[in-house]
Amino acid sequence: MIIKKAELEAVTARKDQYPEDNLKEIAFAGRSNVGKSSLLNLLTGRKKLAKVSGSPGKTRTINFYRINDTFRIVDLPGYGYAKVSKSLSETWGSMMETYFENRQGLIKVVQLVDIRHAPSKQDVQMYDFLRHYGLDGLVVATKADKVSRNEMQKCIRQIRTALKLSQDDKVIPVSSLKKIGHEELLSEMEVLLED
Ligand code: GDP
């Protein structure tokens, strides 16, 4: 799949702000600073579509990007930033629930985890949350340039174990810095959108 057109369609904090039609959507989730904005920019070929943040944990909105006028990429707010207050993390949880429960076009949530580290407790919680909604099955291991080829397999096994992935679940190593893995991810997305 080639992304020819990508435009920010809506920045939302509430359900009534979501785009109204039922275009298919693939959302992206991950803890703050995992490299989500960099990945979205690489996927869409737009350097500044999503903001790469110097200070993590600031995005508190669900952002909808209209792609090729045929589907949407949805940028979910990052989680797990230490300085976030309890009330803010409660808001985050209810924002996720509202979106997952009410979105007919939503077909998959790509879970991002940092390839170098064992998934955090919150990564595991997030993935369980996706499993609950039947939106699990596709994981991207970010910042793959930070590990050697040898280490990569070990890191991926660690991610598979921690998230309790099944054989059918996919883990795609990606580096936005080195531009590796994004084409494989786009192919997976294409398959999902065709189903
Ligand atoms: P977000 O908070 O999840 O949207 O993460 P960002 O895309 O803003 O990236 C957070 C930090 O990780 C930034 O300093 C990026 O430059 C860095 N980063 C993102 N992707 C990669 C990558 O593929 N490799 C490396 N080495 N660093 C990355």
Image (spheres, rainbow, N blue to C red):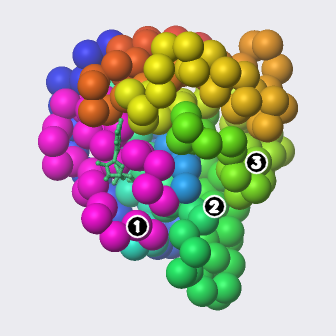
The reply to whether dot 1 and dot 3 touch (C-beta < 8 Å) is: no
Give how far across and how far down residue 117 sits, in percent: 61, 42
Quarter of the image where one finds residue 38: top left
- Per the model, the C-alpha gap separating discs 3 and 2 is 15 Å
Q: Label 1: state its secondary structure.
A: loop
Q: Is mark 1 within 8 Å of ligand 1?
A: yes
Residue type of the residue flagged with mark 2: Met
Is 36 left or right of 162, judged from the image as shown? left
Identify the residue position indicated by label 3 in the image.
124
For marks 1 and 2, give the one nearer the viewer.
Answer: 1
Mark 1 / mark 2, whichever is N-terminal: 1
Residue type of the residue flagged with mark 3: Val
Q: Is 52 drawn above or below residue 119 in the view shown?
A: below
Mark 3 burial class by Cα count in 10 Å: few <14, some 14-19, many 20+ = some
Q: Of 73 and 71, which appears nearest the observer?
A: 73
- Per the model, the C-alpha gap separating discs 1 and 2 is 19 Å
